[in-house]
């Protein structure tokens, strides 16, 4: 069996605790992994003079796959966000965020099964801004054919690989005819090469209303950066919130898997945080590695433990700690495998 080498960034805050739980779960699958542990985040600034040492980027360039816990962005320290810096350094242009209902997780909806594919490098989110004069601020919305084409191809390839039926492009091309118009045109052109996948588009405001009213109509949502940022939080809300929202940042031949949530400093070191979002990020990682069987088993184990509602953390209505919930999921994996 191939042994995978994977860069592991536990992060800070609750990161190390949820990472320890996720590793116990992955170990239970029997997929052989050599973890290359590297440090990043607020806690390493004194040691390396930066929250993102070069050794982290070098390790990911070498292993091609990383799993990452949340990292605190030090406020007012002059350091930029580790997360944004990583995405830039490795050109991780696709942000993948599944939003899937898990029985037992409190939510207003059942049966939601959506995936948001968000462009990660351009759009208003790139933060290209200037003061035109002291009373006028401007922000540039930059959309390119290359950026739109590679994210659209990613969405269709993902849909095909995962057996999904439909891609919906999200835009406001009725108003931003050039920028969102280009994104939509390119999405339409790319769709022609995937006749097996249905394609449609929605204007972003209508998309928000439709998602709240009938999320079951949608499947893969293809979004430019800013709409993707907003819609993915909306969709996380449809399935019970941040504690259960996994994610991945993917570039050419490189992928970094991480939960959507942050470092929750108030729970750091207390064995309280919910490890689910990181464990579900590990499910995406196993699938990416070409281990769909192990990925499926871990997902089923998460569903079983949350469904029983006993050994789960406070946010899921339980009294267990991070470690115990991780062990409960690992035991379930061992039973299912
Ligand atoms: P947060 O996600 O850390 O916390 C938001 C709320 O959700 C808090 O009440 C928190 O306690 C709770 N929460 C989050 N994850 C949880 C979990 N696994 N289990 C139980 N409760 C959980 O967001 P924030 O407070 O805005 O950010 C804190 C820090 O994290 C900031 O420095 C921010 O920059 C950073 N951050 C990092 C990432 C990342 O590394 N990808 C993402 C978002 C925020």
Image (spheres, grey):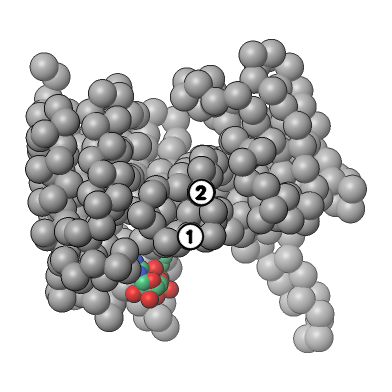
Residue neighbourhood size for the residue with mark 2, other residues' Cα within 10 Å, grouped as few (<14), some (14–19), many (≥20): some
Q: Is residue 255 above or below residue 233?
A: above
Horizontal and vertical percent position of residue 212:
66, 56
Q: Residue at x 57, y 31 (%)?
A: 155
Q: Is residue 204 above or below residue 198?
A: below
User: Which quadrant of the structure image shows residue 192?
Assistant: top right
Q: Quadrant of ligand 1?
A: bottom left
State whether residue 92 appears in this view: no
Horizontal and vertical percent position of residue 334:
10, 35
Q: Is mark 1 within 8 Å of ligand 1?
A: no
Check disc 1 and report its element: helix, strand or loop: loop
As rendered, which of 227 and 201 lies closer to the eye? Answer: 201
Check disc 2 and report its element: helix, strand or loop: loop
Which residue, given by chain and number where applicable, does mark 1 sit on?
107
As rendered, which of 174 and 44 lies closer to the eye? Answer: 174
Q: Residue at x 36, y 61 (%)?
A: 243
Q: Residue at x 24, y 32 (%)?
A: 297
As rendered, which of 161 and 336 lies closer to the eye? Answer: 336
Q: Is residue 245 left or right of residue 72?
A: right
Q: Residue at x 73, y 66 (%)?
A: 139
Which residue, given by chain and number where applicable, does mark 2 sit on?
110
Q: Do the CB atoms of the residues marked 1 and 2 lie less than 8 Å apart? A: yes
User: Which quadrant of the structure image shows residue 262?
Assistant: bottom left
């Amino acid at each position: 069996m191939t042994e995978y080498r994977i860069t592991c960034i536990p992060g800070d805050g609750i990161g190390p605790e949820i990472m320890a739980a996720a590793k116990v779960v992955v170990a239970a699958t029997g997929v052989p992994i050599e973890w290359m542990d590297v440090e990043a985040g607020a806690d390493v600034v004194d040691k390396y003079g930066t929250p993102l040492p070069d050794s982290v980027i070098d390790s990911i360039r070498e292993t091609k796959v990383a799993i990452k816990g949340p990292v605190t962005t030090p406020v007012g320290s002059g350091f930029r966000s580790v997360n944004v810096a990583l995405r830039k350094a490795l050109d991780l242009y696709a942000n993948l965020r599944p939003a899937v209902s898990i029985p037992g997780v409190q939510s207003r909806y059942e049966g939601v099964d959506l995936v948001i594919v968000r462009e990660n490098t351009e759009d208003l989110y790139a933060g290209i801004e200037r003061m035109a004069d002291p009373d006028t601020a401007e922000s540039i919305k930059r959309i390119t054919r290359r950026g739109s084409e590679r994210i659209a191809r990613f969405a269709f390839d993902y849909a095909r690989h995962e057996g999904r039926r439909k891609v919906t492009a999200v835009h406001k091309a009725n108003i931003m005819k050039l920028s969102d118009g280009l994104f939509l045109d390119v999405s339409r052109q790319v769709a022609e090469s995937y006749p097996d996948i249905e394609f449609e588009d929605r204007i972003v405001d209508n998309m928000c209303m439709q998602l709240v009213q009938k999320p079951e109509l949608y499947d893969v949502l293809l979004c430019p950066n800013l709409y993707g940022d907003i819609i993915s939080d909306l969709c996380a809300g449809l399935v019970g919130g941040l504690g259960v929202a996994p994610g991945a940042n993917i570039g050419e031949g490189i992928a970094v898997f991480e939960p959507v949530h942050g470092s929750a400093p108030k729970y750091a070191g207390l064995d309280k945080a919910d490890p689910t979002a990181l464990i579900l990020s590990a499910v995406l990682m196993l699938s990416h590695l070409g281990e769909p069987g192990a990925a499926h088993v871990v997902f089923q184990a998460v569903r079983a433990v949350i469904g029983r509602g006993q050994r789960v953390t406070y946010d899921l209505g339980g009294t267990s700690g991070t470690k115990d919930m991780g062990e409960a999921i690992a035991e379930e994996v061992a039973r299912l495998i």
